[in-house]
Image (tube, rainbow, N blue to C red):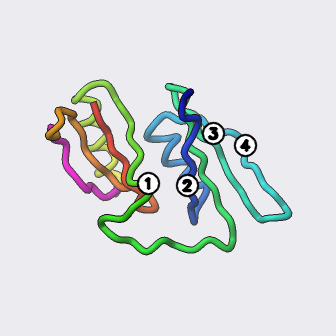
């Protein structure tokens, strides 16, 4: 058994697709459209085989932002080395994305940073 994909709703489907393709090396399929429901989506596939489904529907609404809530907390990308974590963190911050946590060694021994994607989803970048 394995986790096939994680799905998130978005307000700007193409902007989110471009973010995950540009910064995390994902490969996007063609946009899926369901004319009956208004659903549009992309699957972004990463080198590991994991996938992220980003979806849009006209009737979705923004979730109320709170610091600590139940549910999906973050997406995590393992880059392999501390140098790659530092570099991607610098690139993302330089391109205007919000840094939530600077690169650091966590209490459980990981080296990671946390940056927010274009719609404020937490993206953990780790080695």
| Quadrant in the rendering for residue 121 | bottom left
Q: Which residue is identified by label 1?
A: 72
**What is the chief secondary structure element of the magenta stretch?**
strand
Q: Which residues are magenta?
A: 97-105
- Nearer to us: label 4 or label 2: 2
Give me the residue at 66% from left, 47% from top.
Answer: 42
Mark 2 closeness class: few <14, some 14–19, many ≥20 residues within 10 Å: few
Give me the residue at 49% from left, 48% from top.
Answer: 19
- Nearer to us: label 1 or label 3: 1
Q: Label 2 near label 3: C-beta < 8 Å?
A: no
| Quadrant in the rendering for residue 2 | top right
Q: Secondary structure at mark 3?
A: strand
Was residue 102 drawn as part of the magenta stretch in this picture?
A: yes
Q: Is residue 23 left or right of residue 8?
A: left
Q: Quadrant of the N terminus?
A: top right
Q: Secondary structure at mark 2?
A: strand
Label 1 and label 2: CA atoms lie apart by: 9 Å
Q: Which residue is identified by label 3?
A: 28
Mark 1 closeness class: few <14, some 14–19, many ≥20 residues within 10 Å: few
Q: Secondary structure at mark 1?
A: loop
N-term-proximal mark, 4 vs 2? 2
Q: Which residue is identified by label 4?
A: 30
Q: Label 3 near label 1: C-beta < 8 Å?
A: no
Label 4 and label 2: CA atoms lie apart by: 17 Å
Q: Which residue is identified by label 2?
A: 8
């Amino acid at each position: 058994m394995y986790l096939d994909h994680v799905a998130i709703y978005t307000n700007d489907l193409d902007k989110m697709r471009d973010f995950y393709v540009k910064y995390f090396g994902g490969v996007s399929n063609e946009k899926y459209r369901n004319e009956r429901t208004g659903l549009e989506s992309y699957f972004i596939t990463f080198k590991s085989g994991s996938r992220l489904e980003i979806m849009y529907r006209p009737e979705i609404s923004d979730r109320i932002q709170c610091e600590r809530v139940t549910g999906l907390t973050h997406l995590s990308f393992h880059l392999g080395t501390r140098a790659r974590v530092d570099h991607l963190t610098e690139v993302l911050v330089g391109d205007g994305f919000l840094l939530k946590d600077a690169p650091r060694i966590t209490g459980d021994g990981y080296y990671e940073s946390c940056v927010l994607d274009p719609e404020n989803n937490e993206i953990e970048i780790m080695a």
